Image (cartoon, rainbow, N blue to C red):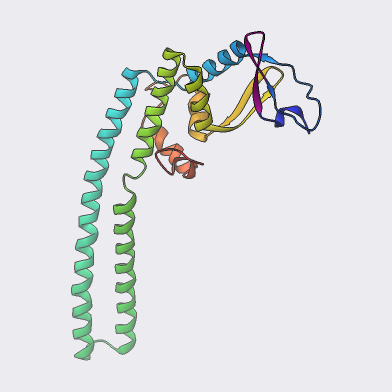
Amino acid sequence: MPDFYFPITAEVQKGHNYYRCTKKREMCSQKYVREEMLTEQVKSFLQKVSLSNQDTEKVLHELDKDEQKTKSSSREILQNLKSEIIDIGVKLDKLLSAYLDEIVSTEEYAAQKQKLLSRKVECNEEITEIENGSVSWLEPAREFVKSLNHASKLLQSGDKSEMTTFLKQIGSNHILFDKSASFSPKIQYELAAERSEADSSHLQFPFWRRVQDSNLQALAGPSFQD
């Protein structure tokens, strides 16, 4: 098995922290890496996914506006669906009366009744879907934005321990190969990193929609758990 499939461990030598892959079954061919070198690599990734305080406020403000817009639109749609359900009830009553008065045949009554009831079920399903999910993606999106801002704050503080914790939270498969550390970031962080800079021009509403639609599990909760 290649060396880089093994996790990273730390050792202290001559007052300095060194890192290497943890390979217990045989001698690992990978050389030790100074902590300073790995720290710079970590900072480089954090820089790609960091969002300043100012840009964070802008994006959160846009998300707040979008939430209000979505709720307003949802209210109108819900009202229309509920009105349609009431109309269906009226039509069913009229249809029953027409059937009892022998204005429509048994076959016509059954067919029209089934059509109306099917539409009523569809309306109720649409109502449930809107009530449960119209803005459900917004809170995970907000938490994601805040996590990008946290990356920016980590760069400012230089807290190596917190940087390590952050990387563990946003990805997996942390490996060391050829003196370079790498890992598999969750989809939303990978998208942000690919843009090189996580600024407000890259993090507009369509971006959140693309992330949500392409990987719902990645945004299943505010903690972005696997």
Q: Decide: is 221 above or below 174.
A: below
Question: In the drawing, does residue 55 fall left or right of residue 226?
Answer: left
Q: Decide: is 35 above or below 82.
A: above
Identity of the residue drawn at 50% across and 21% down: 161
The magenta stretch is 8-19
Q: 134 or 179, which is in the foreground?
A: 179
Residue 139 in picture, x, y percent from top left:
34, 39
Residue 196 appears in view:
no
Residue 93 appears in view:
yes
Identity of the residue drawn at 77% across and 30% down: 2
Residue 180 in picture, x, y percent from top left:
66, 19
Residue 217 in picture, x, y percent from top left:
48, 44
Q: 122 or 18, which is in the foreground?
A: 18
Residue 20 in picture, x, y percent from top left:
69, 21
Q: Does the magenta stretch include residue 17?
A: yes
* Quadrant into which the N terminus falls: top right
Q: Quadrant of residue 90?
A: bottom left
Q: Residue furthest top?
A: 14
Question: In the drawing, does residue 37 fall left or right of residue 225?
Answer: right
Question: In the drawing, does residue 28 fall left or right of residue 64?
Answer: right
Q: 59 or 154, which is in the foreground?
A: 154
Question: In the drawing, does residue 147 fall left or right of residue 103?
Answer: right
Identity of the residue drawn at 31% across and 58% down: 128
Q: Quadrant of residue 15?
A: top right
Q: 35 or 44, which is in the foreground?
A: 35
Secondary structure, magenta segment, majority class: strand
